[in-house]
Image (tube, helix red, strand yellow):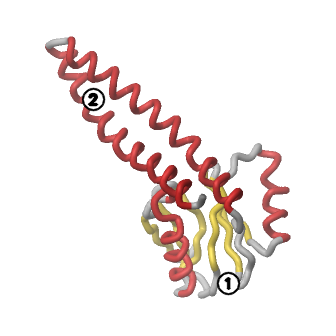
Amino acid sequence: MGETKFIVSNGIAFSEKKDLKMLRKYAAKGWIVKRFKKMGYELEKGVAEDVIFSLDVRELAENELEEYIEIFEFASWEYICSSYDMHLFKARPDTKPIYTDKETKQEKIKNLRKPVILAVAISMAMLIVSYIVFSVSSGILSAIFSKLFLLSLVITIPMLMTLMATYYHSFRTK
């Protein structure tokens, strides 16, 4: 395996276009995307290429991935990798974009929002329960739940910001 590096994502919900442009710049310098996670991208040193990137958000059953990739390949998009329900593709700069109309853009945002809503619901529930227990208890129980409350707060705020970003992008594409 060649030289690798990890670059941090700006957050798909906040700045997908910025991330994809950043990946294009790295590809032009010979840093090729090998895989991605929610927090960033793993790049490997290779041959420089002029490509554009696109991200599709779609829940797939295990037996659907191969056919799904073939559909994109037919449209000249090369599959790179998947993480959760996000699938990264690359193509030549003159390739037709994956998302060209408002309906498909809205569908993509909805698909991105689904797991965020669940995470917000869980973190909010944890926040509320920990606050209530912290407020009505004393001693060691109060101390434990005060720490749990702070942890819940640290988790809930970014989750809420991410959820708001998906609604903002949804509003902008109307």
Q: Is 142 drawn above or below residue 31 in the view shown? A: above
Q: Is 75 drawn above or below residue 138 in the view shown? A: below
As drawn, the label of residue 168 is none
How many other residues sit within 10 Å of disc 2, few (<14), some (14-19) or many (≥20)? many
Q: Earlier in the sequence, mark 2 or mark 1?
A: 1
Q: Amino acid at mark 1?
A: Pro
In the visual, does 136 lie left or right of 41? left
The residue furthest left is 139
In the visual, does 22 lie left or right of 86? left
Give the distance between the C-alpha atoms of the residues marked 2 and 1, in whole angstroms.
48 Å
What residue does disc 2 label? Answer: 149
Q: Quadrant of the C terminus?
A: bottom right
Taking the spot 30% from the left edge, 22% from the top edge, the residue there is: 130
Q: Position of residue 170 (x, y in %)?
A: 56, 54
Give the SS element for disc 1.
Answer: loop
- How many numbered marks, from 0 up? 2
Of residues 127 and 40, the one drawn nearer to the viewer in this rendering = 127
Q: Position of residue 100 (x, y in %)?
A: 71, 68
Picture quadrant of residue 138: top left
Of residues 82 and 165, the one drawn nearer to the viewer in this rendering = 165
As drawn, the label of residue 93 is 1
Give the SS element for disc 2.
Answer: helix
In the visual, does 59 lie left or right of 154? right
Q: Quadrant of the N terminus?
A: bottom right
The residue furthest front is 174
In the visual, does 132 lie left or right of 167? left
Q: Amino acid at mark 2?
A: Phe
Q: Position of residue 11 (x, y in %)?
A: 46, 59
